Image (cartoon, grey):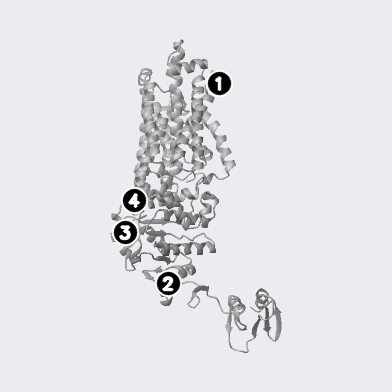
Amino acid sequence: MNTKSNKKILLILIILSVLLIIVFIVDLFLGSVTIPFKEVLKILISGKSENQIWSAIIYDFRLPKAITAVLAGAALSVSGLQMQTIFRNPLAGPYVLGISSGASLGVAILVLGFSSYLTNQSVHYFGNWAQVIAAWIGAGLVLFLILAVSMRVQDIMTILILGILFGSATSAIVSIFQYFSHQSMLKAFVIWSMGSLGNLSKSQLNILMPCIIAGLCLSLLFSRILNVLLLGETYARSLGVNIKFSRVMLFISTSILAGSITAFCGPIGFIGIAVPHIVKIITKSADHYYLIPGSILAGAIILLLSDIISLLPGSDSILPVNSVTALLGIPVVIWIIIKNKKIASLS
Amino acid sequence: MNSSENILSIENLIIGYGSAGSKGKPVFSDIKLKAKKGENIAVIGRNGIGKSTLLRTISRLQKPLKGNIRIKDKDISHYTKQEFARIVSFVSTEIIRISNFRLIDLVALGRFPYTGWIGKPGRDDYDIINESISQVGIDDLKYKLVNEVSDGERQRAMIARALAQDTEIIILDEPTAFLDMPSKYEIIRLLNELTVNRNKTIIFSSHDLNITLQEADKIWLMEADEIVEGAPEDMILNRNIYNLFDNSNMSFNIESGDFRLNRNITGKIMLNGKGIAEYWTRRALERLGFEISDETGQELFVQVDDNKKPTEWILMKKGNKIKTNSIYNLTLHLRDII
């Protein structure tokens, strides 16, 4: 084995880890309330500060948000990587199975469909748990459909097309709900669909974190099978891979990752498609042993960066994170395509 | 090598698509075939007759509609996935394009049935991987990327991957498709070497009849409703090969073992000369549609004079004598007559 290139990749992973820590701290430091950098570090290390409000801001708001950004960036990048490998398609992403559309449908039915039954108090009482659960159910139903299909259908391209069709069908239903719903509820839905990292309470983070860790572990367990799947399913089968089982497990992993993030943060675009390509280019590797950790680190870094930009340092307004990820990412993808001139072989 | 040992035996096999039973669509029925250890077997037949389906069924990539396939005296459906992957490997004609993927990484995937899910190939595995790479002659390319090498080199790497899988049987579906002539010969020659040096049993399909008839130990000839087994020479002597060209314009030359398009005869010509110059002049005249006649008194007569340097061709045409210095110029003069 050419150990030289492996050492180089390990070095890249170490650099990414250091970058992640830096960006994470910068993200904690920034916000509409200015807290001195020293105080941020002090609060993080000792857990205390002279200023109770500062430590409350850090612990109750900025830290959960930064952790959410890390989890979401990692989850979306890894699920995008898995989908690109399974479908052998460089344009596949975490939402290609229709998971975000399913989640949107769940939220749309809740927010738009039942809005007349919801009083202000009940919304307040449930918090955004109702939204999260609705999104989960929607994503889960789409996953169930996809699994049912993939048990019967051999050809992976058929599954890809069906996933896109499910997605379009659910989006169409969502549009109908939007058309008939009340303006204020419509705005609530649109805001959900723009994505947000800052809405999670600590108790929700306690649910999201184990979900994402489980999904990532499942993905890491399948890194060798993902390598074999690069050759396509015929070769994978002839090498003794249980295709149906692997496919189901990887779909479940993707749904846990992308579904949970969509449920808690809304659909966050671009990260899942672009980050795996960035990682493939900087590591110059196709080995999922390295690509998965690389995607976890790079995805977390890029979503933290997006969050930093969305705070518009120096101003009081906040941009929707979805717009930032798109504006930040699309130039990167275009640059990759033009520089490589072979997006077709990037899968 | 025990020459009587059948490593593979197929009986009453029906191959096709769909589920077993009455619902399936059979492609080929009543297949009965045998393969011995160390044999290099070529599957030939027309497009769409079911060569790929047969190879895929033997490789367990699709289920038979009916019948038995036994490998080492055990029905193939009784092997676990991992056991089977250690006995039969498969190489398809599909061109693999993966970025950032070196040939050595590609070959290393062949060790999957031995390292399992989570394990990484170790030093022993890399010994086998490097040996496989040497065997197919791509040592100096092993750190090149899959997208940087030629189709022939990539196909060699795919065969090395099958070797790394260390199976007794290697099945290849049209391994020489898309390759240029020298690469086709090299790949088939390589397969032959593997049967001799490594005692592998190789079953491959091909449309390159010239090469397969020269290199294969045995032919499985898929005709309209049966598969005929035998040495390539048997196929020629028993005239089975002719059946491949029943409805086409091709004919098979039983003496030279090669194929020609049937042509309409446009005239007779007499040829005089000797050696290779005469042979290739004859080929050119036949290509133009002339029947070479030994009878004297033809209107047309060609004399090949290879005593002269360079060789000279003399065409007697209705009493006129035309001298040319190449076959091409000779054909230009003859074209006027046709």
Instruction: Using the numbered discs, state the Cα–Cα distance from disc 1 to disc 3 in whole angstroms.
Output: 67 Å
Task: For mark 2, give the secondary structure.
Answer: helix
Report the front residue among A152 and A65. A65
Which mark sits nearer the N-terminus, 4 or 3? Answer: 3
Label 1 Cα neighbours within 10 Å, binned few <14 / some 14-19 / many ≥20: few
Instruction: Using the numbered discs, state the Cα–Cα distance from disc 2 to disc 1 in whole angstroms.
Output: 79 Å
Q: Amino acid at mark 2?
A: Pro
Mark 4 and mark 2 in contact (Cβ < 8 Å)? no
| Callouts 1 and 3 on one subunit | no
The residue at the point 54 percent across, 61 percent down is: B180
Rendered view: B148 above or below B244: above
Residue that mark 2 sits on:
B232
Rendered view: A1 above or below A214: below
The residue at the point 39 percent across, 31 percent down is: A212
Residue that mark 3 sits on:
B65
* Side of B94 where A248 appears, left or right: left
* Side of B270 where A299 appears, left or right: left
Dot in front, 2 or 1? 2
> Mark 2 — on which chain does it sit?
B
The percent coordinates of residue B272 (x first, y second) are 62, 84
Q: Can residue B115 be seen in the rendering of this structure? A: yes
Residue that mark 1 sits on:
A313
Which mark sits nearer the N-terminus, 2 or 4? Answer: 4
Q: Amino acid at mark 4?
A: Gln
